[in-house]
Every structure is written in C-alpha cells, then in structure tokens.
Amino acid sequence: MLFDISMRMEKENITVIIGPNGAGKTTLFRTIMGLTSIYSGKILFDGDDITNMQTNSIVKLGISYVPQRENFFENLTVKENLTLGGYLLGREEREAQMKEVLELFPVLARKDYISRKASMLSGGERRMLALAMGMMKKPKLMLLDEPTEGLMPKLAMEVYDKIRRIHEDARVQIVMTAEKARLSLELGDDAYILSNGQIREHKDAKEMLKDPDLEVKYFGIT
C-alpha cells in the first residue's frame, strides 16, 4: 500500500527511488501503469491525467515499464523478444528502432546472440535484453524496477552505464527503483527514500549519498 505519495519527476533527471524490500517501490510503478487501483489523487504525465487510463493507452503515450521479473520471454530468441517489444510500431518503424536499440546494446546484435534463446543468456545479458525491449517502445519515460537486482557490483555497473546512455544519448527520462542505495545514487540526479509505503525524504541524489544517516532513513527507522 502507498499513503499520501506526492512526487514530481523532472524530464532531464534520472530519478532514483530507494527503499528496502516491501517498501512499495513496485506498487508505485504498477500504479503509474494502471495495473493497480488508485483510491484518491491523480497521476499526471506531460500534463495529461492518466489516473484511470488503460495500460495499453499509457504505453502509447510513451511510458515504458521494465518490471523486476518476467520482463522477457525465455523461449523466444533475442530478436523475437525485441520484435515483441516494438509491437506498437509499424514494420518499417520497428526495424529502424531495432537498429538504433542494437547500437546501444551491441552484444545483443552479434550473430551468435540475436538468434539465441533468451533462456541461454547470462544474468547481465538478460538485464540488457529487458532494457532493450523497453527501448523498442520508443519511450519518453522508462520505469525501471530494480534493474540490477541480484547482479554482482561489476555487472550492476555495466547495466547502470547502459541506463546512463539511454538517458543521455537517446534522451529518455529515467525513473528507477533500487535496493543498492549507494550505487544507484551515484547514477541518479534526484532521489526519494520510500519506506512502509511513504516518502521519507526527497533531495538531490549526490547530497543524499553524503548523508551519514542514510541507512537509518533507508530502512525507515525513526
């Protein structure tokens, strides 16, 4: 459950939402995407009220959601997954977008990868594929739920580097959740601490990183 959530996420920023497991991070994204009920308040995107909008319509507006799990189809190849990621695009537009996306993720473009079943990819490669599928929708905004969950720090940094490139090169607004607080704050511009369904703090990510009481606030201890 979420209580009295009030957030403003700027287009030019990578916004990081940190908090422990069960804090409400996934619920927040599912609410934005119209996948859970909202009992009061509004959700605005580019000035439009999307509160009661169907998920498919929200995607068409330019919001791409990459969930923490079940974010690709294991029995399909990399190319087939990317094709499905661009299901809203016409054939020519989809092919052009796939070319751009594979330039961001060159490892997936290799002949021995593009035709490989997703189930055969490593953990880091799976995260890359999930991000690439999210990019196939030509998004204005990407909601990334725990994009480095379960990855070793070196692999997590590789994924964060791709997220930075998506933001800077493709000019896509990024809002991401994370349990790895310090790594994600190093990447972010703007940061929120979410705990027990409530916003505990909001400040510049680099300033939050310097906070000696970060761990106390992160775990919602008062």
Image (cartoon, grey):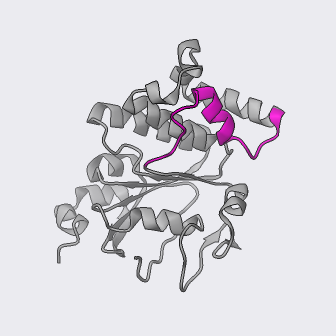
Q: Position of residue 198 (x, y in %)?
A: 36, 76
Compared with 162, 141 (above or below) is below
Q: Which residues are magenta?
A: 69-91
Residue sitting at 45 percent across and 78 percent down?
A: 5
Q: Position of residue 161 (x, y in %)?
A: 43, 35
Is 89 in the magenta?
A: yes
Q: Could you say which quadrant of the image residue 149 lies in? A: top left
Q: What residue occupies the far bottom of the structure in this picture?
A: 40
> In the visual, does 181 lie left or right of 176?
left
Compared with 70, 17 (above or below) is below
The front one of 82 and 207 is 82
Residue sitting at 81 percent across and 34 percent down?
A: 91
Is 58 in the magenta?
A: no
Looking at the rendering, in which quadrant would you find the N terminus? bottom left
Compared with 160, 211 (above or below) is below
The front one of 98 and 175 is 98
